[in-house]
Every structure is written in C-alpha cells, then in structure tokens.
Amino acid sequence: MELTATQQDALTELINIGYARAAAALSDLTGHRISLEVPEVAIHVISEIKTRLLRVIKDEVASVNQVFSGPINGNAILLLDREAALLLNNLLTDRDQAQGKLDGAAREVITEVGNILLNACLGAFGNLLKVQVTFTVPYLQVDNVDKVLRSITVQGSELEYALIIHTRFHMRASNVSGYLVIILGVTSLKTLLEELRKWEERELR
Amino acid sequence: MGRARASLTTENMPKPPSNCEATRETALLSWIQQFAPYGVVTLDESFRVQGWNDWMEIHSGMRRQEVAGINLFTLFPDIHQRNLAGNFERALKGEASVLSTALHRYLLPFRSPFPEGVSAHMLQTARIAPLFSEEKVCGVIVVIEDVTQRESQAEALERQHRRDQLVSWALAHLLKTEQPRKAIRQLFFKIAEQLDFDTFFVYLRDVETGQLNLEAVGGVPVESDKEFLACPFLNQLSGGSSDVFVLNSVQQLQTPEYEAFNKVGIRAAVGFSLVANERNLGLLCFASCSRDTIATEESDLLATIAQFLATALDRESANGQLHKAKEALSEHARLLEQKVQERTARLRDTISELETFSYTIAHDLRAPARGISGFCEVLLEDFRETLPREAGLMVEKIARAGGRMESLTRDLLAFSKISRQEIVLAPTQIEPVIEEISALRVPAIRQAIRVRAPMCPVRAHRGLLQHALSNLIDNAVKFVEPGAPPKITIGTEPVSHGSPGNRSRSLTFSSHTPLVSEASTSAPAGEELPGYIRIWVRDEGIGIPREAHQKIFGIFERGITSDGYEGTGIGLAIVARAMQRMGGTYGVESEPGKGSQFWLELPAA
C-alpha cells in the first residue's frame, strides 16, 4: 500500500504538530534547544518492515514500546541504534557515558524521550480523531531489530500496516537519527486516513 | 504495569466488584501494592490522594490517614514548580509517562536512604498513568522506584573507571617520557583537575645539597613555596618519617605553622614523600580549597601516582648518572688514546734519533778504526826490524784493538741498517739462502753444515733471513770446545700455535712498525690460522745456560760461556731485530755442554 502525495503531506503535517509538542517538552526538560524533524513518512505492510528497517538499522537497537488503544489501536515503537541511543543520552544529560554501555539511568532517559515522542505523536492522532487514545506505560527493550519486531507483531492477527516515520533530533550541533514505527490494524489505518482527509478539508476551508 | 484498574484498592479505595475472579485479582493487586518495593499512590480526578502504600508511609513519613483526600500538589508543591504537573494532567487524558532519574532526579522530595551518597534526595524513577473504570479514566496512579543505590553504584563505578583511566594515563605518560621532571606540570594539572583538587606542588631534592626545591606548582602563587616548607606536614614528609600525610579541616587548625596554607585558602591537603630505592627524592602534595576532607580512596590513588613519579624520577636520575659515567669514560679513553699516541710519537722520534746517532757513530768510527788498523799493519810490516820488541808487541795490540773496533762498527752498522731498512715479505726458499751462506765459508765449515731436506718455504725478506741464518751458523761454528770440529744441522718444521698471542714472541720492542702487524697475522676467530714454519739451527757446541737464553738476544750481550770467544755481542741482536722486522719469532733451547738449538719462526709461504 502506498500513500498518495496528499496523504503523505497531511500525515507529515500532523506528525509535525505532535513533534512540535515533543520538542518543546524536551527543550524544557533539558534546557537545551531541541528540534525534531520528519524527513520521511512511509507506510508498509508489516511483513515488509523488517527488511526495510534492517537496511537502515543494523545490530542492536534500543526500542521504546507503547501500546495504544481506543478508536484506533496498535503499537508504537521508537527505534534507535546503539550509537544514537548513547549520543542522545549524553546530549540530554550532559554526561559522557564513557564505557559505551546503556546503563539503568540511560535506559530510563531513552524510555522517557520515547514516551514523550510517542505520546505527542499519538496524542496528535487522538486530537485529530476527537477521541481519547489511551496508552500503556512504555517499556524499553534492547535487542536486534528482528526480535523487537517479533515481540510486537505476534499480538495482532488481522492484516497490519506499519507507519514508518524517520525522525531526526537536532540539538547542541548534533543530529540523532531514529525511526518511529506505528503498527496499525487495517481498520485503524482506514479510520486514520479517512479522518486525515476530513481534517485537511476542514483546514483548507 | 498494564492498564491500571480503578479496582486497585487499599482501605481508602472503592469497594471491589463482587464476582469471585475480580475479588482474587483485587486481593492480589492489593497485596502487591502493599508490600511492593515501590511507592504506589493513586489519585482521583482532582489529584486527591486515594491510595498510599506502606512504602509511601515509610519514605514520606506521612501516614495514609494524614494524606487521604489531600491534593498531591498541596502535599508536594514543588511538583508544580518543577513543571511536572503536566504529566498528571495528561494522565487524565489517557497518557502514561515515565520520568527518568537522569532528567528529573526525583518526583517526590524524599530523604535519601544514603545521605552521604550522590544526592540529598532519594533518586527516583516514576511512572504516571491513567486509572480506568469501565473504559473511562477515573484517576491517576503513580509508581515510584527508589534508584538511589543503583545510581550511587553506577556513579562509583564511573568514578572508579575514570580514576583507573587517570592512573593508566599517568603511568603510561611517566613510563614513556625520558624526562619525567619536564612532564610533571602537565601531568599534575590534569590529575588535579580530574580529582577536583585546586592546588598541587612538587618539591624535589637536590642530589648534591640535599635541599628541597620547588619543581612545579599549580593553583597557588609560586611565592607561597618557602612558607609551605615550614609546615610541619611537609617537614615530616621530607624528613622521611612518613610516606603519606593527610591533613583535613586545615582552616580549623589555629597553629601558626599552617598559616601558609590558611593564607591561600587550603582546606584539606594530602602529601606523599617520593621514595625510590630507599632514597627520599622529594615530595608531592595535592590540596583542596573547597573540601575539608580527603577520602581514603583519593589518597590511595594519589599514593600510586606518587610512587609512579618517584620511580620515574629515580630512573631519570639513574639514566643521567649512567650517561655522565659513559661520557666520562669515553673522555678518559680519548685522553688516554691521545697520550699513547703522543708518547708513541715521541718514542719513535727518540728511537729514530738514536738509530741515526748509532748509525752515524758506527759509520764515522769505521774510517778512523780502519786507519788505526792500516797504520799498525804498515808499522809492523815496514818497521818491525827497527822497532824495539816491546813497541812491536804494543803495535800488535793496537792492531788487534783496531780490528775489533772495525768489526764492532761493521756489526753496529749492520744492526742499524736492519732497523732502518724498508722490507717487503715474499715467499722465500731456504735452501738457496743456506747455500749462499756456506759458499762464502771455508770448506771445513761448508762440510760441517747438514741440511735436513726438504725445507718448507717461508714468507720473509731474503736479505734479512740470510743475515739472521748466517749469524746463527757463524755462532755455531764459533762456540765449540777448543779444537772440536763444528757440527751444524739445519732443518724446518711446521708449527701450530693456538693464537699468535700464545707464541713466544720474546721481543716486543721495535723502532718501526713491523710490516707484518699483529692485526694482519691474527686471523678472525673460527678461521684456520696461517701456518708457521720453524727453522732450526742445531749445533753440538758448548751450550748456553738457561738463565742466559733471553739475555743473549740483547745488543752487546754475550753468554757467560762465551768468554775467550771473539765476538761483538751484536750477532744475535741482529737476528732478533731481523725477525722482529719480518713479524717472526725466535728463541733458543740449550744446555751447557749439550749444544744449542736456535730457532726462527716465520709464516709459511
């Protein structure tokens, strides 16, 4: 399934709204100016995403995982490779994690950042749909991409789609790149796209 | 934590549903909440406290009854001040959030379980999530985890890691550098910075005077140096009475000795004597202007670094001494070489002068000696009849003395010539040389000479060899019992010697550099040495006592047994000098009454 240019634009804009909130929250939190950018949004059937993600993320990833439910439901995951996770932690906490390990404190920081990002993004969807989307408490998993995806996709049985949002953090002259993956059932995706169309119409009016 | 249900209860919570399964679940949740090693707080939609578990009672110091129904933000106003209320408000909209320690330190300001640790507050990780009742959000649940211990351990680990790195760095630096003294400043600035010290100073002992001199200082004015040295603390270290000295709470010491420290604001200091190989090389001190105590682990770490420094300094000084000794030795060798050269040159000049002198004397004496002999002969032949008998006898004596003087001058001249002559060694057959010698002798002597053929050729200067052999043959002819016929046997044999150094080179004195020098006669180790040929001349004459064997080769030396035999005492000296010039050796084996065997050794051709 491919998004039309219009859908893609609308989706990007919507996500940007959410990201603006997340960036503001992160800037407040750290006292550094942080901006978030969405260079690319794409949609794929779930069977394809592993291959696609493996192209950009190798080895271990730190994944922040949150389940959301409501009129649309699914799984939202922030994926950062090890270096990105370490750099993000160092930039946010002013620490230099010299040993190259994600210790307990660093894992929590990544979880909180993922939480802020996922909440902002899904909150924007909720606002759009004028419904309440509720979330579980996020959890962090450090593993290879394959295992991370497997632990998520076993849950749903209906045909699922994954919205892959390439995400870039800018802060203190550094860039950290990651991927936000939102896995939705076909019904939820249809609802989302439909609501997106209506939202655009309203906006244009 | 999944979706928290409103049915999670404590005594303040709403009543649980009546069905059995729900009751069991409720009981379980209630139990977990009660005894969980976490703080669990539930709030209603207006953030009023509903649930407050045991953990919360213990750590907040507030009983459940005291807080029930009170707004959490009233209990902890700093939640608002720290911009954390948003998380609670969003929870009411269904959002769950995580607050990490690294970014927030804590959610609720509780006292740290380790007050001496990293933080005065308990470090917390918090999760704030909506509570649902029949799919509707009805409140907020907060779960607080105490991570103080984890963070303390992580920080201790991190600190240890950095210190290990610092020690390795210092060690590598001190090992690598040739001149640790030059590295001190850079090294200790970094160490002081890393370990949060404001000041360091290093005193090194002057090797000659034993005085302590300031080598490097950081963080305080250099002028403080003399006053520091008066501090009893430094005295003890420099006197070697202690290796480590920690001085805490300096500002509280009212003693005037520490006035110098007080003046520059030092509050705590730690010092080490730099000892290597039982020598006190100086002292190293770190001080802080912001802390009153220095931890044992810090002083242990610095003690290690001080030991590294002492070892490096000791090595530097040992290297320096070695270098000096080497220089002195090579200078001494150079001077010695120069002296030897000068003396050799002087000696050569002297010898050359002496030889010229003896040559001149010998040469100039010949004519007057011949004159004397000549005129004596004229006197005896032409005027014998007219001379009184006494006078005739005197003239005869004068004639004999003149003849002797003539032979002396002739032999001396020959000796001089041999010493001065340029010679070139070449393969030489010995038989023709002997034939030539015997051809000039009377038939009786000719017949007395036996040659053991075949004879091995040698590398020699033919003229010198002939001269030497001729003198040996003449001696063999001369030194026989009166009336006994001479018997002379000449032969050769190859000889093998371990090395030229073992050979009986009996004369080591030469006015000229021998053409065959030591270097060219000695072969490199492992190679076959060039063979030598011994030429021997045996007689059955009167023999020579052992004690005279060496002496007879000296100039003007004659054997004790040679009394009554004519001679100048130069013949064997000529043999010796000739052999010396050719790089050969010579000697004699003899006993009185048993004849003599003279030998010459020369390289085989």
Image: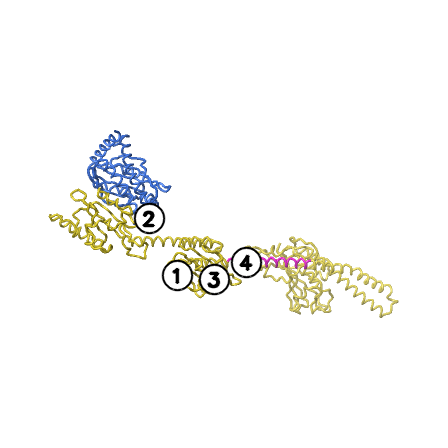
Chain colours: A blue, B yellow
Residue under label 1, please give it. B249
Q: Which amino acid does label 2 sit on?
A: Lys
Question: Does the magenta run of residues contain B139?
Answer: no
Viewer-nearest of discs 4 and 1: 1
Quadrant of res B112: bottom left
Q: Is residue B599 visible?
A: no
- Cα gap from disc 2 to disc 1, whole angstroms: 38 Å
Which three-letter amino acid code belongs to the residue tagged 3? Leu
Say whether disc 4 or disc 3 marks the residue closer to the N-terminus.
Answer: 3
The part of the chain drawn in magenta is: B319-348
Q: How crowded is mark 4: few (under 14 residues within 10 Å), some or many (20 or more)?
A: few
Mark 3 or 1, closer to the camera: 1
Q: From the viewer's perspective, is B557 left or right of A90?
A: right
x and y percentages locating residue B71 in the rendered image: 22, 49
Please provide percent x and percent y for residue A15. Answer: 28, 36
Prevailing SS of the magenta stretch: helix
Q: Is mark 1 on a helix, strand or loop?
A: loop
- Category of crowding for the residue at label 1, using alpha-carbon neighbours closer than 10 angstroms: few (below 14), some (14–19), many (at least 20): some
Q: In which quarter of the image is residue A139?
A: top left
The answer for how far apart the CA atoms under marks 2 and 4 are is: 52 Å
User: Residue B470 versus residue B573: which sits nearer the camera?
Assistant: B573
Mark found first going from the N terminus, 4 or 1: 1
Have a look at marks 2 and 1 and say if they share a chain.
no
Give the quadrant of the C terminus of chain B.
bottom right
Q: Which of marks 4 and 3 is in front?
A: 3
Residue B144 position in % (x across, y down): 24, 50
- Report how far apart the C-alphas of labels 4 and 3 lie in the structure: 31 Å
Instruction: Where is residue A94? Give x, y as percent.
Output: 35, 47
Is B336 one of the magenta-colored residues? Answer: yes
Residue B229 badge = 3
> Nearer the viewer's eye, disc 3 or disc 2?
3
Residue identified by numbered label 4: B324
